[in-house]
Image: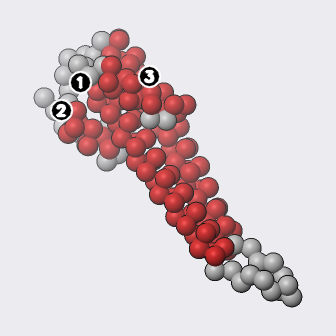
């Protein structure tokens, strides 16, 4: 059976225990990043409901971590390239500051902060939905989690 509006499966009502674990997977991604959803995913694999919700939180955190790491690599590569291209040993010139720092750092910081805010909002919203027993899926990631978890 599938819900006609979202394409997500509708099965028997999840138990209170399943609802609690599914909500906990979303809530734990806020303070523990990907570790909390991973532990719940591994512990409660027999429940399709918990597996689906924990996998969504885990996939979001993996994507966010990849964006964070790539952003750090690009930022530091730009910093080192700017520092290495600066002229050295000319005492009559005023000191130059790395351009990559003044351009790259605000972009990197805004990316990390917006990802953190999105994680916070997703964690709270979908924790509440899971606690109500809804098969609510994250935008885009929900389809991947559905396909991977077999829900």
Q: Is residue 78 above or below residue 69?
A: below
Q: Is residue 48 left or right of residue 55?
A: left
Residue receiving disc 2: 150
Disc 3 from disc 2: Cα separation: 21 Å
Residue receiving disc 1: 48
Residue at 26 percent of width and 22 percent of height? 45
Please state which of residues 131 and 145 is positioned toward the viewer in this rendering: 145
Q: Is residue 89 left or right of residue 100?
A: right
Disc 2 from disc 1: Cα separation: 8 Å
Residue at 18 percent of width and 32 percent of height? 150
Which quadrant holds residue 136? top left
Residue farthest toward the front in the current orientation of the protein = 89
Residue at 46 percent of width and 46 percent of height? 65
Residue 125 is situated, as x and y percent measured from the top left of the image, at 46, 33
The tag on residue 24 is 3
Tag 2's secondary structure? Answer: loop
């Amino acid at each position: 059976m599938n819900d006609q509006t979202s394409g997500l499966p509708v099965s028997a009502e999840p138990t209170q225990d399943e609802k609690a674990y599914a909500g906990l997977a979303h809530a734990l991604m806020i303070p523990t990043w990907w570790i909390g959803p991973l532990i719940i995913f591994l512990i409660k694999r027999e429940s399709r409901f918990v597996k689906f919700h924990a996998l969504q939180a885990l996939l979001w955190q993996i994507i966010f971590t990849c964006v964070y790491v790539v952003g750090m690599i690009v930022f530091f590569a730009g910093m080192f390239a700017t520092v290495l291209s600066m002229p050295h040993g000319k005492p009559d010139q005023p000191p130059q500051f790395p351009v990559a720092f003044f351009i790259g750092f605000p972009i990197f910081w805004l990316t990390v902060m917006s990802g953190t805010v999105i994680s916070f909002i997703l964690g709270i919203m979908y924790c509440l939905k899971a606690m109500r027993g809804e098969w609510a899926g994250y935008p885009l990631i929900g389809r991947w989690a559905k396909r991977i978890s077999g829900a």
